[in-house]
């Protein structure tokens, strides 16, 4: 497994805004033009990457992430200079020739066989293909750049492919040139800046099927010809509705088109901006479902258009996609499917190996280790509980403002918190800190007793989770059932308190059931003896 050792974390005052000092601040990448010529045989390809960037400090050098496996044929600058450089420890260091505030460009010409990031190989049907797969910082294995989510840029592509192939990439298709020997060159260009980890190309003998429906966003399925019917009739049958629902709920779809591409990604799906790559295994085994499509489609808004500024805030990407996946089904009236999805997320998190770790975990150095139940299902539950905390109106107004404010940019957790506080009209720091910086979740032990003379039920609960997890401020709904009658109340745990009690009056006979959080609105586990105290 490829790992990347993060540098020491900066000590900042606000733990909800923590970032690592791996972020380079001496330059700002503005645009990439990535030209790739894919081979008819073998894995060696030829590339040329032109980068436009802004000088922000007088460091005197441009540092790029690039794999040392490649031979650098030449380096040219916008003012006609010819540079020479070697890649050492995964970095290509070039001298600046301008002053702070200048915009420069440099083009790297190179060739070689990638050892990661771009896979030129046979697909599941034995046909040759080529697909990029960048997450988290693997773009460096096929083009030079700033391989970190904090520095988004525009991108364009010129992809030369063998005869009979099509090529897809981010953005819109500008043109296709006919070359010699049946080869062709496909030109794609983005109209919005995107993170480097979503800048991709895909190529092979692909079939393209347009998706038509209520949304005005151009969508198409790019599949191997053996799998095109499954894609159309199966998991993508409502993807146009997904785009329409998310657009109305969150804001306009952020890109010029959306391609759904069968590929060789190592993940179930990869949310590349405007060109989602889905694993070929899900097609071949006919196991890919609508939930995955909804998850990756939601990423176009959160993760792609609004990107986490630092890897440790990955929940702003994966937690959002993990919540907006089941939320789609609730929004179209399939409430049972929404509830089942959230129930499965809860079970997945509580049964995971990371319950003893916080969501924002600055001790993680292996970026792949961040693909865990904290950032996915727990992140989804944090959003669901935030929705319950502030109410639907404030929550969705806040979501829309968060998207509008940080679209085409990056954000940290405290950016989201500040917007939600404004719409809730009250502080939310305690909510964010306990769910994101504390490990675990509340484990409640509940007992109740019935007073026959006073016709009242007294419910007591204690937070019994490990002491290392801390205590949680909670308001837990209580439902007391007597036959077909229901009484409701709430248990309130103030800060630092492990026990809470509430008495429900007017209960004329002993309860047949007493339940905490019957609507499953909280990330809690409740144990209770049968029949009361």
Image (tube, grey):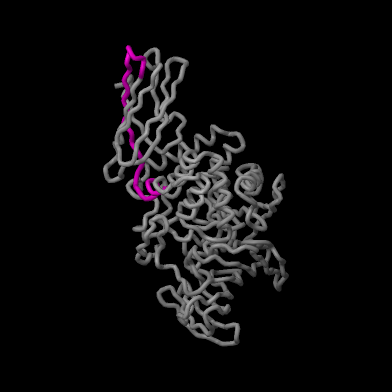
Query: Who is closer to the viewer here, 473 or 110?
Result: 473
Q: Which residues are magenta?
A: 432-456
Quarter that holds the C terminus: top left
The answer to whether 451 appears left or right of 373 in the picture is left
Q: Is residue 531 above or below residue 233?
A: above
Q: Which residue: 42% across, 19% down?
A: 481
> x and y percent of residue 507 in the render?
40, 16
Question: Looking at the image, how many numbered discs can be counted on the residues?
Answer: 0
The answer to whether 9 appears left or right of 147 in the picture is left
Q: Which residue: 43% across, 45% down?
A: 378
- Where residue 74 sits, quadrant-wise, is bottom right
Any part of residue 32 in sight: yes
> x and y percent of residue 202 in the render?
60, 61
Any part of residue 236 in sight: no
- Where residue 448 sits, quadrant-wise, is top left
Q: Is residue 245 magenta?
A: no
Query: Who is closer to the viewer here, 2 or 514?
Result: 514
């Amino acid at each position: 497994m490829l790992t990347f050792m993060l540098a020491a974390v900066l000590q900042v005052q606000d733990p909800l805004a923590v970032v690592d000092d791996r972020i380079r601040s001496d330059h700002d990448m503005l645009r990439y033009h990535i030209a790739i010529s894919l081979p008819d045989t073998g894995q060696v390809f030829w590339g040329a990457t032109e980068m436009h960037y802004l000088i922000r400090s007088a460091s005197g050098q441009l540092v790029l992430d690039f794999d040392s496996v490649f031979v650098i044929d030449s380096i040219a600058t916008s003012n006609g200079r010819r540079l020479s450089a070697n890649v050492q420890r995964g970095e290509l260091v070039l001298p600046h020739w301008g002053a702070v505030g200048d915009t420069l460009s440099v083009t790297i010409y190179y060739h070689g066989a990638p050892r990661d990031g771009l896979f030129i190989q046979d697909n599941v049907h034995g046909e040759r293909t080529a697909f990029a797969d960048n997450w988290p910082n693997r773009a460096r294995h096929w083009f030079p750049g700033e391989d970190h989510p904090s520095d988004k840029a525009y991108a364009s592509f010129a992809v030369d492919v063998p005869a009979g192939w099509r090529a897809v990439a981010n953005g819109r298709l500008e043109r296709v040139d006919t070359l010699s020997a049946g080869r062709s060159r496909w030109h794609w260009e983005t109209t919005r800046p995107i993170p480097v980890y979503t800048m991709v190309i895909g190529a092979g003998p692909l079939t393209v099927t347009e998706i038509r429906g209520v949304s005005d966003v151009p969508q198409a399925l790019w599949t191997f010809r053996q799998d095109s019917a499954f894609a159309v009739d199966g998991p993508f049958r409502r993807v146009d509705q997904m785009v329409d629902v998310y657009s109305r709920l969150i804001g306009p779809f952020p890109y010029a088109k959306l391609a759904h591409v069968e590929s060789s990604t190592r993940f179930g799906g990869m949310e590349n901006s405007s060109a989602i790559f889905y694993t070929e295994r899900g097609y071949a085994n006919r196991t890919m479902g609508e939930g995955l499509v909804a998850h990756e489609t939601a990423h176009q808004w959160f993760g792609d258009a609004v990107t986490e500024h630092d890897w440790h805030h990955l929940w702003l990407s994966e937690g959002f996609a993990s919540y907006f996946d089941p939320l789609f089904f609730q929004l179209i009236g399939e409430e049972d499917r929404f509830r089942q999805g959230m129930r499965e997320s809860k079970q997945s998190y509580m049964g995971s190996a990371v319950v003893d770790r916080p969501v924002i975990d600055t001790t993680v150095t292996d970026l792949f280790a961040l693909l865990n139940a904290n950032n996915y299902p727990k992140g989804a539950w944090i959003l669901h509980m935030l929705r319950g905390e502030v109410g639907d109106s404030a929550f969705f107004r806040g979501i829309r403002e968060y998207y509008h404010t940080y679209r085409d940019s990056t954000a940290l957790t405290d950016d989201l918190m500040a917007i939600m506080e404004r719409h809730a009209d009250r502080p939310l720091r305690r909510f964010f800190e306990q769910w994101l910086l504390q490990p675990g979740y509340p484990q409640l032990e509940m007992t109740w007793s019935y007073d026959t003379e006073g016709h009242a039920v007294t419910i007591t609960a204690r937070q019994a989770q490990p002491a290392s997890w801390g205590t949680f401020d909670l308001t837990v709904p209580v439902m007391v059932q007597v036959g077909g009658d229901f009484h409701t109340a709430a248990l309130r745990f103030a800060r630092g308190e492990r026990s809470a009690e509430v008495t429900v009056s007017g209960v004329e006979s002993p309860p047949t059931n007493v339940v905490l959080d019957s609507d499953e609105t909280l990330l809690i586990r409740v144990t209770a003896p049968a029949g009361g105290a």
